[in-house]
Image (tube, grey):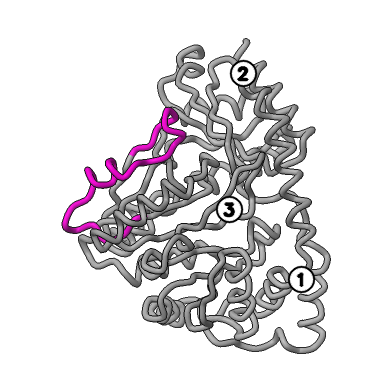
Amino acid sequence: MKLSKRVLEMQESVTLATAARAKTLKAQGRDILSLTLGEPDFPTPKNIQEAAVAAIEDGKASFYTVTSGLPELKAAVVEYFAKHYGYRIQPNQVTVATGAKFSLYTFFMSVLDPGDEALIPTPYWVSYGDQIKMAEGIPVFVQATEENDFKISVEQLEAARTDKTKVLVLNSPSNPTGMIYTADELLAIGNWALKHDIMILADDIYGRLVYNGNTFTPISSLSEEIRKQTVVINGVSKSYSMTGWRIGYAVGEPEIIAAMSKIAGQTTSNPTTVAQYAAIEALTGSQDTVENMRLAFEERLNTIYPLLAQVPGFEVVKPQGAFYFFPNVKKAMEMKGYTDVTAFTTAILEEVGVALVTGDGFGAPENVRLSYATDLDTLKEAIRRLKDFMEK
């Protein structure tokens, strides 16, 4: 059996691979603390669960919907944008998909031809590059550093731009760094993209999860011209603790939204119907649980950050949003005699039972990612074990 070149060249998701390894060791009876997945540890709020049950009992969840999503869900997204983005869109500017990840995939498949380039600031979420390659595009990585709070400048983008540059991928708040671009920084980037006719892919999935007085500014809200150049990717997974429901959506100009729906029609068809009804309640129902979860993440961030900063060799920039720490561990690796970050995280897992994600998959071979989307007791114990590991 001969596999395709496409799949042979594809990298496995490091987050999912590490999480799977941690689960395997735990199933073998090992005491494992997993800080791997970007998944809130809260159950889906009760009102959302009840809306799903009602849809099942009413018989509404049994059938196909329009590929691009229920009209009622599109209407909910329209109202959500009016409230949280500050501008109005039309239902034909919305397409719903089986998770925000699949929205990203349909976007790249819709806009990239072979050889087209997409600029990706690093560190970056692990799937951007491989999805671009699947669309026969070329990912071009633009290196951000801790010294600039993991944010890239217009000057860096211009240095990376060629006549084949078609897309800029922008993720703020960022996975894995948790950093947020200011309105002024975004305006400069948006105007640069307009000048060179470069599409902006705005991955806003963590937009509601910001802390300590920081503010999320959607780049699409800065001007009508930038808005028309931008496709926004969002979903209910992170803010509403609905990772397993698999509902994401994209908002943009009708032509590209129709193209993305067309691809979904030949691949997944509509997202799961009952999950769509749950998402309607998430977007339109009480938002109290969103704020409660945000406050819990903020408490974890402020509690764990100073403890993590005390781990020998771990140098960490305090995140502003999302729910990840992304410390630089170059000094820690040197102290323990490692030159490879994957080998370093493997040793931590095997010796002290703490599962971290290697920075290699994020384009940052001197960093590791820790998710604080778990309870404080687990986080404190994990940091204690990391400190013990480094002090041996």
Res. 206 mark: 3
96 above or below 59?
Answer: above
Q: Residue furthest left?
A: 163
Point out residue 377 in the picture as x, y percentages from the top left corner. 79, 33
Query: What residue is shown with label 2?
Result: 311
Whether 236 is drawn above or below 292: the answer is below
Q: Which residues are magenta?
A: 143-168
Q: Nearer the viewer, mark 2 or mark 3?
A: 3
Mark 1 vs mark 3, CA separation in Å: 19 Å
In percent of the image, x 63 and y 75: which residue is there? 79
Where's the N terminus, which quadrant? bottom left
Q: Look at the image and tell me whether residue 1 can be seen.
A: no
Answer with the quarter of the image where residue 49 lies: bottom right
Position in image of residue 280 (x %, y %): 69, 75
What SS does tag 1 mark?
Answer: loop
Residue type marked 3: Tyr
Quadrant in which the C terminus is drawn = top right
Q: Secondary structure at mark 3?
A: loop
Residue 297 located left or right of residue 223? right
Q: Residue at x 72, y 36 (%)?
A: 300
Residue holding disc 1: 285
Q: Earlier in the sequence, mark 2 or mark 1?
A: 1
Please provide percent x and percent y for residue 237. Answer: 63, 60
Q: Residue at x 45, y 63 (%)?
A: 220
Q: Residues within 10 Å of mark 2 (few under 14, many from 20)?
A: many
Residue 372 lies, in percent from the top left, at 67, 39
